[in-house]
């Protein structure tokens, strides 16, 4: 039997988590790819390709997830090896990606100004979201804390500027009804 290095164990476990994510989403009825075919980028957050293609404006939020998960897990478990923290982050993200595609969460998203037509993620988009989180985690593990914070603010600012949404705005919309925010976001569609 070949000897596995810790790196190989981490890669194998990460691949298993991604496979689990894909299998569960497929069993939940999510399409593998968009009905219109495969594209690298979906630019219109109101269009039918949003959350269906490899990447979209919400991919930035998933990079921010990774930045946040790195910081929180470093604070919560500083003695845990970075690879173990990465696996925990992947597990959290996979859990969220599955929960995000349940009928209840899809219905809650549809109440938001920018997500009225949201029908969940394609499997390829969801897997890409998890890989984007891993990218954010990796960047946070290499950058000083202040650069990580600036990167998170820049990604959030870019999404807010271009599509009037982002992780923070999404969380606010998910948690409470704020008419002024909803009115501002509806301006994107005009």
Image (cartoon, rainbow, N blue to C red):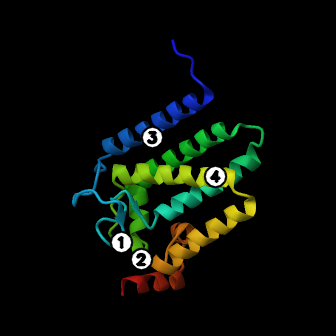
- Lower position in the chain sequence, tag 1 or tag 3: 3
Q: Position of residue 164 (x, y in %)?
A: 48, 78
Could you tell whether 121 is left or right of 96 in the image? left
Secondary structure under tag 1 reads: loop
Residue 102 percent across, percent down from the top left: 40, 52
**Which of the two labelled residues, at mark 3 and mark 2, occupies the earlier sequence position?**
3
Give x and y (percent) for residue 4: 57, 22
Q: Which residue is mark 3?
A: 18
- The tag earlier along the polypeptide, 1 or 4, is 4
- The circle drawn on residue 116 is 1
Q: Which residue is mark 4?
A: 69
Earlier-in-chain disc, 4 versus 2: 4
Question: Which of the two discs, 4 and 3, labels the residue nearer the N terminus?
Answer: 3
- The residue that mark 2 highlights is 113
Question: Could you say whether the residue bearing mark 4 is in a helix, strand or loop?
Answer: helix
Distance, label 4 to label 3, CA atoms, is 17 Å
Q: CA distance from mark 3 to mark 2?
A: 30 Å
């Amino acid at each position: 039997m070949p000897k596995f290095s810790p790196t190989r164990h981490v890669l194998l476990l990460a691949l298993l988590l991604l496979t689990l994510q894909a299998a569960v989403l497929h069993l939940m009825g999510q399409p593998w790819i968009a009905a219109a075919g495969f594209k690298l980028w979906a630019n219109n957050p109101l269009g039918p390709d949003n959350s269906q293609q490899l990447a979209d404006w919400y991919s930035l939020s998933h990079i921010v997830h990774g930045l946040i998960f790195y910081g929180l897990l470093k604070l919560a478990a500083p003695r845990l090896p970075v690879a173990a923290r990465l696996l925990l982050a992947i597990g959290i993200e996979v859990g969220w990606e599955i929960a995000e595609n349940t009928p209840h969460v899809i219905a809650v998203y549809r109440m938001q100004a920018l997500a009225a037509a949201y029908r969940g993620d394609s499997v390829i988009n969801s897997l890409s979201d998890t890989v984007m989180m891993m990218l954010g985690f990796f960047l946070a593990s290499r950058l000083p804390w202040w650069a990580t914070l600036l990167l998170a603010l820049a990604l959030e600012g870019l999404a807010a500027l271009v599509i009037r949404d982002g992780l923070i705005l999404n969380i606010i919309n998910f948690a409470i009804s704020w008419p002024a925010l909803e009115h501002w976001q509806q301006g994107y569609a005009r």
